[in-house]
């Protein structure tokens, strides 16, 4: 292995997840942390840790000088950005290269091309993928915007080009609401992403959110590891993910997975990545939506079905190794489901930070937990409310649902409020169990 020491430029469960794989590969780890995270599990488990600033992300986990300095003083060879924060920042990838540090992710050219949601759609169309052609909201008049949206037909979706994680998006059902929404979203996008570019696309009324996991090396080899269904969402943020997607037949599954491989080859991709699609259940047609140039929150469901450690493969690719996996080597076993456990008030859905009095993880056959909390740990109010992920694997979807219900009932988190009961309601819902739902499922059923 080329790398002797990797700095993990992230926090929470993904930092712990990366750290564990590094340890299995015999690689030393450096974890960075803000003052709010000094007692987090990733800090306790790392070989070394460096405080990089106060709680505010812009002064710590988003501070490139602080992270690069931490890598220099600890003698790290490479930086793994995890997801969120700097994971899809082309400037950070470029600076890592300048500082002779390997960025464990795709090349900066791929990040730049696929990070822009408008440009990425043009690239995907060039690669032969079906796309919902967007209207770019820039250098055009209000009347031109309204005319184009009217021709497209309502409802439409307004999205921030540089957005992600469900932020900077709004469904618009009536023409009178479009311009006010654009004005508000431009302000939000500039504040949240540093870019106020927006676009409008047709809103599909009965969609599934399907994504394909791909893995590519720096020698032109690309494979896919199947698809995931991320349709259960709240405010465009994923809540439950599963693999395989229950509504795809084998022919459509092969088409969508092959299209992701084709796109990765077309753009010269060279790391783990995810190609996301909207699947129109009425028309039986999928459309390219975006590409995430990083590891995903929901990657464990793919690992459970394939037995492939995606973080390990990502590190090996970054070290310049060729893929040892061919497409024919990848096999899929059973079904897997992941539930994101958030520290939040189940009624208001507001974050619920605070001290955990007692924490008990579920266990047993087919149960995996990715987390960073423990009894006595204080959940910070400064970051994302996700504190754990419960992942189950079974022979089929029905067994997975029942296994997840059992695992969640075993999960005990005292002292703070969580969304555990929401997940149990989802799992018990007849439409979820019957596979009869779309991305508006939570809006309609879980008010």
Image (tube, rainbow, N blue to C red):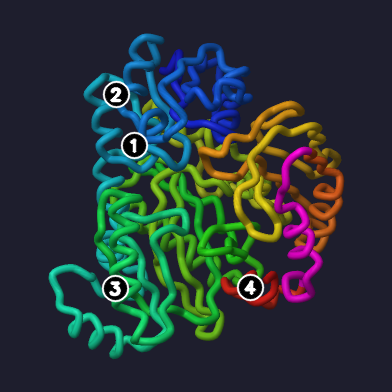
Q: How many marks?
A: 4
Mark 1 and mark 2: Cα distance apart in space: 28 Å
The residue at which mark 4 appears reads as: 441
Mark 1 and mark 3: Cα distance apart in space: 31 Å
The residue at which mark 2 appears reads as: 65
Res. 329 in view: no
Report the magenta residues as a range: 415-433
Q: Secondary structure at mark 2?
A: helix
**Position of residue 36 in the picture relative to residue 85 (left or right):** right
**Mark 2–mark 4 contact, CB under 8 Å?**
no
| Viewer-closest of 234 and 348 | 348
Badge 1 or badge 2: first in the primary sequence: 2
Q: Secondary structure at mark 1?
A: loop
**Image location (x, y in percent) of residue 331:** 63, 49
**Position of residue 263 in the picture relative to residue 256 (left or right):** left
**Position of residue 297 in the picture relative to residue 359 (left or right):** left
| Viewer-closest of 248 and 76 | 76
Mark 2 and mark 4: Cα distance apart in space: 43 Å
Q: Is residue 408 magenta?
A: no
| Viewer-closest of 292 and 197 | 197
**Image location (x, y in percent) of residue 83:** 47, 41
Label 1 neighbourhood size at 10 Å, few (<14), some (14-19), many (20+)? some
Badge 1 or badge 3: first in the primary sequence: 3
Residue ID at (78%, 32%): 357
The residue at which mark 1 appears reads as: 218
């Amino acid at each position: 292995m080329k790398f002797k020491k990797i700095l993990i430029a992230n926090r929470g469960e993904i930092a712990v997840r990366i750290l564990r794989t590094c340890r299995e590969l015999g690689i030393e780890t450096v974890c960075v942390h803000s003052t709010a995270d000094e007692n987090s599990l990733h800090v306790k488990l790392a070989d070394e840790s460096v405080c990089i600033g106060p709680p505010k992300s812009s002064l710590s986990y988003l501070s490139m000088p602080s992270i690069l300095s931490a890598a220099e003083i600890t003698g790290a060879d490479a930086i793994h950005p995890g997801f969120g924060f700097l994971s899809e920042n082309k400037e950070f990838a470029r600076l890592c290269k300048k500082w002779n540090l390997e960025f464990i992710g795709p090349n900066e050219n791929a990040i730049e091309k696929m990070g822009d949601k408008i440009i990425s759609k043009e690239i995907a169309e060039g690669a032969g993928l079906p796309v919902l052609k967007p209207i770019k909201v820039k250098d055009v008049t209000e009347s031109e915007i309204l005319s184009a949206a009217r021709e497209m037909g309502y409802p439409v979706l307004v999205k921030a080009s540089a957005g992600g994680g469900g932020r900077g998006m709004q469904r618009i059902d009536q023409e009178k609401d479009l311009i006010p929404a654009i004005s508000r979203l431009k302000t939000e996008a500039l504040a949240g992403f540093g870019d106020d570019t927006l676009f409008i696309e047709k809103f599909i009324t009965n969609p599934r959110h399907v994504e394909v996991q791909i893995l590519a090396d720096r020698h032109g080899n690309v494979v896919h590891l199947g698809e995931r269904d991320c349709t259960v969402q709240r405010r465009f943020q994923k809540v439950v993910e599963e693999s395989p997607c229950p509504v795809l037949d084998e022919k459509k599954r092969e088409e969508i997975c092959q299209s992701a491989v084709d796109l990765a080859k077309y753009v010269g991709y060279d790391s783990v990545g995810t190609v996301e699609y909207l699947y129109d259940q009425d028309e039986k047609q999928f459309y390219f939506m975006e590409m995430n140039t990083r590891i995903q929150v929901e990657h464990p469901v793919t690992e459970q079905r394939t037995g492939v450690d995606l973080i390990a493969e990502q590190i090996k690719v970054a070290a310049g190794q060729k893929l040892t996996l061919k497409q024919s080597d990848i096999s899929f076993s059973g079904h897997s489901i992941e539930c994101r456990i958030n520290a939040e008030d189940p009624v208001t859905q507001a974050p619920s930070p605070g001290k955990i009095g007692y924490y008990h993880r579920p266990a047993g056959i087919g149960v995996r937990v990715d987390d960073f909390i423990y009894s006595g740990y204080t959940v910070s109010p400064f970051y994302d409310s996700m504190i754990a992920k419960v992942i189950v694997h079974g022979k089929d979807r029905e067994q997975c649902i029942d296994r997840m219900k059992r695992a969640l009932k075993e999960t005990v988190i005292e002292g703070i409020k969580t969304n555990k009961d929401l997940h149990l309601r989802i799992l018990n819902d007849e439409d979820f169990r019957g596979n009869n739902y779309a991305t508006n499922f939570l809006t309609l059923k879980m008010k």
